[in-house]
Image (tube, rainbow, N blue to C red):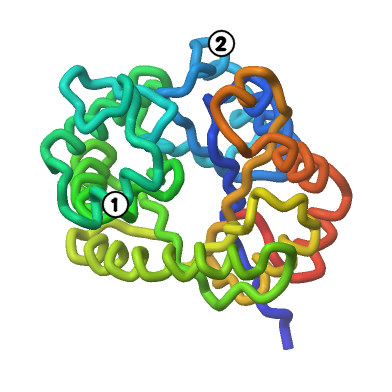
């Protein structure tokens, strides 16, 4: 009897474009074939032509690596469109406030749509093609009102691209900060159910399973976390990660700093390919 085919997954590094240090770490892992996807935030400060060109060069050595759009609608970033609202001091709203106003249906879909269209257009301008897939910084693509605009923008601006849903294949069970992680995962599960239904209704493909959410405020053992992420993840599933090197720009923009270097160290080391082999998993 022949051995079963290996499970193939996406291992996706978010936040390309947030800083030069993060970009450098992601490119190195792509060149090592330790990642097969990265999501680019086109409103980030590190999306110069040189940063895009060097990413394309890394992907050229790893031809199965996808490049997606990391749509951004939260502070401390600024919109591309002139009339975007609501804002806070010229920036997008903080995450918690955006979630509240979306849950109470106080967003204007046309304004959200225009900003997402502009971010897709900026991606096409930078890379010379549409993104392979689309997701959202801090999972904003799942939020009420945002999800409809997001799916419309994906279908019209990037035909053939898939989108990220964030529903787990099975509950998270282990690791530091498990209670906080579980609450976050339950929220993502609930938001993702509606997102999947809407995506299926409009004919937009999405990943069948998701992992990678954990309490970023805890140091954590990323090797143990990766074992949990892989446990029960279906073929075609996606693991989100945030590797990179810390620099001053990152410190100014994002609270997730040192943990990025811990993720990079694990993914660059021998443990990552060994775990994939032990679990009969391959990057797509």
Q: Quadrant of the N terminus?
A: bottom right
Q: How many marks?
A: 2
- Where does the image place residue 133, in percent across and percent down from the top left? 40, 44
For the point 29% across and 52% down, the residue is 100
Decide if residue 78 is on the left or right side of residue 56.
Answer: left
Q: Return the residue at label 2.
A: 50
Decide if residue 149 is on the left or right side of residue 39.
Answer: left
* Residue placed most toward the observer, 33 or 178: 178
For the point 18% across and 37% down, the residue is 113
Q: Nearer the viewer, mark 1 or mark 2?
A: 1
Q: Quadrant of the C terminus?
A: bottom right
10 Å neighbourhood of mark 2: few (<14), some, or many (≥20)?
A: few
Which element carries disc 1, helix, strand or loop?
Answer: helix
Residue 211, quarter of the rendered image: bottom right
Mark 1 or 2 closer to N-term? 2
Answer above or below: position of 119 versus 34: above
- Where does the image place residue 85, in percent across and percent down from the top left? 20, 30
Decide if residue 263 is on the left or right side of residue 100.
Answer: right
Q: Determine the residue located farthest toward the bottom in the rendered image.
A: 1
* Residue placed most toward the observer, 15 or 35: 15
Which element carries disc 2, helix, strand or loop?
Answer: helix
10 Å neighbourhood of mark 1: few (<14), some, or many (≥20)?
A: few
- Where does the image place residue 233, in percent across and percent down from the top left? 59, 71
Residue 100 numbered tag: 1
Q: Is residue 64 visible?
A: no
Q: CA distance from mark 1 to mark 2?
A: 38 Å
Answer above or below: position of 48 versus 30: above
For the point 36% across and 27% down, the residue is 129
- Where does the image place residue 245, in percent across and percent down from the top left? 73, 28
CB atoms of marks 1 and 2 within 8 Å: no
For the point 29% across and 62% down, the residue is 195
Q: Is residue 232 visible?
A: yes
């Amino acid at each position: 009897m022949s051995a079963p085919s290996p499970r193939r997954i996406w291992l996706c590094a978010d936040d390309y474009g947030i800083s030069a240090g993060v970009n450098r770490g992601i490119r190195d892992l792509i060149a090592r074939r330790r990642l097969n996807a990265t999501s680019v935030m086109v409103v980030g400060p590190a999306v110069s032509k040189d940063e895009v060109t060097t990413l394309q060069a890394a992907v050229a050595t790893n031809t199965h690596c996808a490049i997606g759009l990391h749509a951004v609608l939260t502070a401390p970033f600024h919109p591309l469109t002139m009339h975007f609202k609501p804002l806070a001091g010229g920036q997008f709203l903080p995450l918690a406030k955006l979630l509240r106003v979306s849950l109470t249906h106080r967003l204007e879909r046309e304004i959200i749509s225009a900003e997402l269209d502009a971010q897709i257009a900026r991606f096409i301008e930078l890379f010379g093609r549409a993104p392979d897939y689309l997701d959202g910084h801090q999972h904003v693509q799942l939020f009420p009102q945002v999800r409809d605009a997001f799916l419309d923008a994906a279908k019209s601006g990037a035909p053939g691209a898939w989108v990220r849903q964030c529903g787990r294949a099975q509950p998270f069970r282990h690791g530091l900060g498990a209670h906080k992680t579980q609450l976050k995962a339950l929220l993502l599960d609930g938001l993702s159910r509606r997102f999947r239904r809407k995506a299926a209704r409009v004919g937009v493909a999405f990943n069948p399973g998701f992992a990678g959410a954990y309490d970023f405020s805890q140091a954590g053992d990323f090797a143990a976390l990766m074992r949990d992420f892989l446990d029960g993840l279906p073929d075609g599933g996606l693991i989100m990660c945030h590797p990179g090197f810390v620099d001053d720009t990152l410190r100014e923009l994002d609270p997730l700093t040192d943990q990025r270097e811990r993720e990079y160290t694990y993914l660059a080391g021998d443990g990552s390919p060994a775990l994939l082999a032990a679990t009969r998993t391959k990057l797509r």
